[in-house]
Amino acid sequence: MIGLVQRVKQAAVEIDQLPVCAIGRGILLFLAIEKGDNEKNGDLLIEKVLNCRIFSDQSGKMNLSLLDIRGELLIVPEFTLAGKIAKGKRPSFDMAAPAEVAKKLFDYVSGQIENKYKAVKKGYFGADMSVYLINDGPVTFWLKC
């Protein structure tokens, strides 16, 4: 399971030029499900995302978590994070989980996060989305669980 975590000032998702959801200060999480991933991978990723200290405290040090600042979280399914461009010029998605497995785990992860933290929005699995963000920093981390 791969999570691309971006600290944002704001982020939004549109589908067919219509607004779907938006957040203010918080985290934009792009989430990819790989073959072999399971709920344990999801639980580990959830804990890391909610508790990673990537927000600045009063001294300017990254010392506060999403929970500490009461920020918002936007989760966007992003299977291309599981892609590889090792040979040639066209990406291979051999490591990406099949769509039905990936959707089930995406729903599990987003549902578990919503149970633990209420300020959560999410994109639509399988949709062609436009994602807008204002990165804060920029601060971006790659998590593999």
Image (cartoon, rainbow, N blue to C red):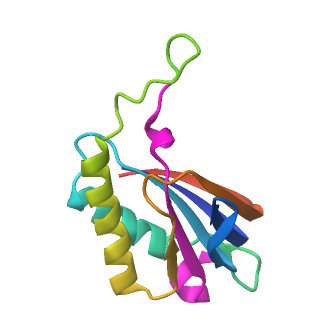
Q: Position of residue 51 (x, y in %)?
A: 46, 75
Q: Residue at x 27, y 39 (%)?
A: 35
Left or right of residue 92: residue 24: right
* Residue 67 in sight from this viewpoint: yes
| 52, above or below 1, in the image | below
Percent x, y for residue 113? 38, 77
Judge by depth and name the residue closer to the eye, 123 or 81.
Answer: 123
Q: Is residue 44 above or below residue 38?
A: below
Please identify the residue farthest to the top as the structure is shown. Answer: 88
Q: Which residues are magenta?
A: 63-84
Q: Quadrant of residue 139?
A: bottom right
Relative side of 56 to 102, left or right? right
Using the image as rendered, state which of residue 86 and residue 55 is in the foreground: 86
Q: Position of residue 101 (x, y in %)?
A: 24, 50
Q: What count of labels does the image hold?
A: 0
Q: Residue at x 33, y 85 (%)?
A: 115
Would you say residue 65 is visible in this rendering? no
Residue 77 screen position, x and y as percent = 47, 56
Residue 54 placement: quadrant: bottom right
From the viewer's perspective, is residue 16 above or below residue 72? above
Q: Residue at x 58, y 54 (%)?
A: 141
Residue 35 sits above or below residue 139 on the image = above
- Horizontal placement of 80 versus 12: left or right? left
Q: Is residue 134 left or right of residue 80?
A: right
Q: Write the residue at 54% across / 19% down.
A: 90
Decide whether residue 48 is among the magenta residues: no
